């Protein structure tokens, strides 16, 4: 548990970065600090590992005041991921990741063995270990930064806008990797972002900060969307608020239509849905393509499970050339389809989020 007790930060010159912040971050949770530039979110996060000292109040980790912990000892027990990875340019990827283990006293062989494990954990190929940061893409560098932060297996991980310097496609991939990683390792993660969609996607809870470091709401993503505590929070999530809410409702009540059986070539006749159209199932049955009467292939088309979100289902319908999305069973095989009209009864309750 990380606890902020009436924490404030006033810089020389009178700039109020954080104002009387009270916050309790549960162990094993993913908490996102979000807000506009200058709202004190990075300052708040950096006070956890004493990179910034509070002007008043205190911060505790498992009931121990961080001010009473030797700074080096504290920081070696907390992983830190920087915005631009912050890698040492003169060291290889492997030695960058091994840095913290070496500081903890492991010899070079032991540290590099731990580093290899960390690289594998974040999905980096072992062939990259001997390269230097300049030889990597931006996304690969950021993965190395995450691997370095995780290599010593710290209980707490701080992330300072870790994906803001990469392109949108890589950013989405990194977000998904961090989600999968957190499901596996259950660290206490505190992340800073100015992107409300990123906060809603990743956070178990979100702390919304306004300029001056004033906490306006600390709640789950669904609560932030459906019950914003102040006008400031409402303005932050106002755009596409109802559409965002669909990410937290599932397709479990969907009344879908069944698919006909495929022919010997794996083609499913979908002419009852759209004249002249069919669905081609590949040999592994983990992806499909739409095929029209002229033999044109559209795909691969996204497949949707019943436990997927309404937003995922709606995206799949809109991406389909026939305005129909395909459902798959537990084995990943397509068994049914649905259209926008099928989603209607499920979409209407979400209108409550707009009121």
Image: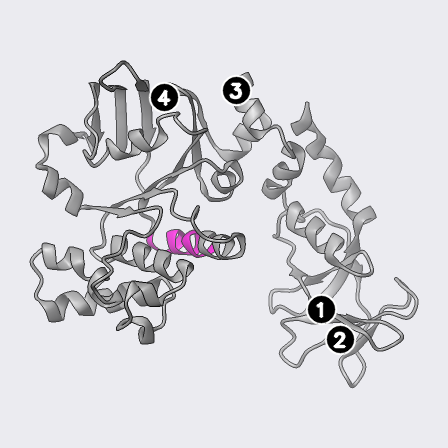
Q: Mark 1 vs mark 4: which is more N-terminal?
A: 4
Q: Mark 4 vs mark 3: which is more N-terminal?
A: 4
The residue at 71%/33% (across/down) is 349
Residue 137: quadrant of the picture: bottom left
Question: Dot 1 lies on which element?
Answer: strand
| Front tag of 1 and 4 | 4
Mark number displayed over residue 280:
2
Give yes or no for contact between labels 1 and 2 (Cβ–Cβ under 8 Å): yes
Distance in Å between CA atoms under marks 1 and 2: 10 Å
Q: How many marks?
A: 4
Name the magenta segment's main secondary structure.
Answer: helix
Mark number displayed over residue 232:
3
Image quarter in which the N terminus is found: top left
| Front tag of 1 and 2 | 1
Mark number displayed over residue 213:
4
Q: Which residues, given as a range, are shown in magenta?
A: 176-185
Looking at the image, residue 109 sits to the left or right of residue 126; the answer is: left
């Amino acid at each position: 548990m990380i606890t902020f007790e009436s924490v404030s930060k006033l810089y020389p010159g009178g700039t109020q970065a954080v104002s009387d912040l009270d916050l309790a971050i549960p162990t094993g949770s993913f908490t996102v600090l979000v807000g506009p530039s200058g709202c004190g979110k990075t300052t708040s996060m950096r006070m956890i590992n004493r990179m910034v000292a509070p002007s008043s109040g205190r911060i505790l980790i498992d009931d121990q005041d961080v001010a009473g912990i030797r700074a080096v000892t504290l920081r070696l027990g907390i992983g830190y991921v920087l915005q631009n990875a912050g890698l040492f340019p003169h060291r290889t990827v492997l030695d960058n990741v091994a840095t913290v283990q070496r500081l903890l006293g492991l010899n070079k062989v032991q540290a590099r063995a731990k580093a290899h494990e960390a690289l594998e954990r974040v999905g980096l190929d072992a062939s990259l270990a001997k390269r230097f940061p300049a030889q990597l893409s931006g996304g690969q560098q950021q993965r190395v930064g995450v691997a370095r932060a995780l290599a010593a297996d710290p209980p707490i991980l701080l992330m300072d806008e870790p994906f803001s310097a990469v392109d949108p496609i890589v950013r989405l991939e990194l977000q998904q990797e961090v989600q999968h990683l957190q499901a596996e390792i259950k660290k206490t993660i505190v992340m800073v972002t100015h992107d409300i969609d990123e906060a809603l996607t990743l956070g178990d809870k979100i702390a919304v900060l306004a300029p001056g470091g004033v906490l306006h709401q600390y709640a789950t993503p669904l609560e932030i969307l459906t019950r914003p505590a102040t006008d400031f929070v409402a303005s932050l999530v106002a755009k596409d608020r109802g559409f965002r809410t669909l990410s937290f409702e599932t397709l479990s009540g969907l009344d879908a239509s069944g698919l006909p059986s495929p022919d010997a070539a794996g083609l499913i006749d979908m002419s009852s849905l759209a004249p002249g159209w069919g669905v081609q199932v590949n040999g592994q049955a983990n992806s499909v393509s739409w095929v029209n009467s002229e033999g044109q292939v559209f795909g691969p088309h996204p497949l949707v499970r019943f436990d997927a979100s309404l937003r995922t289902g709606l995206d799949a319908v809109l991406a389909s050339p026939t305005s129909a999305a395909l459902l798959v069973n537990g084995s990943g095989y397509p068994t049914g389809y649905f259209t926008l009209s099928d989603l209607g009864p499920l979409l209407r309750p979400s209108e409550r989020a707009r009121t």
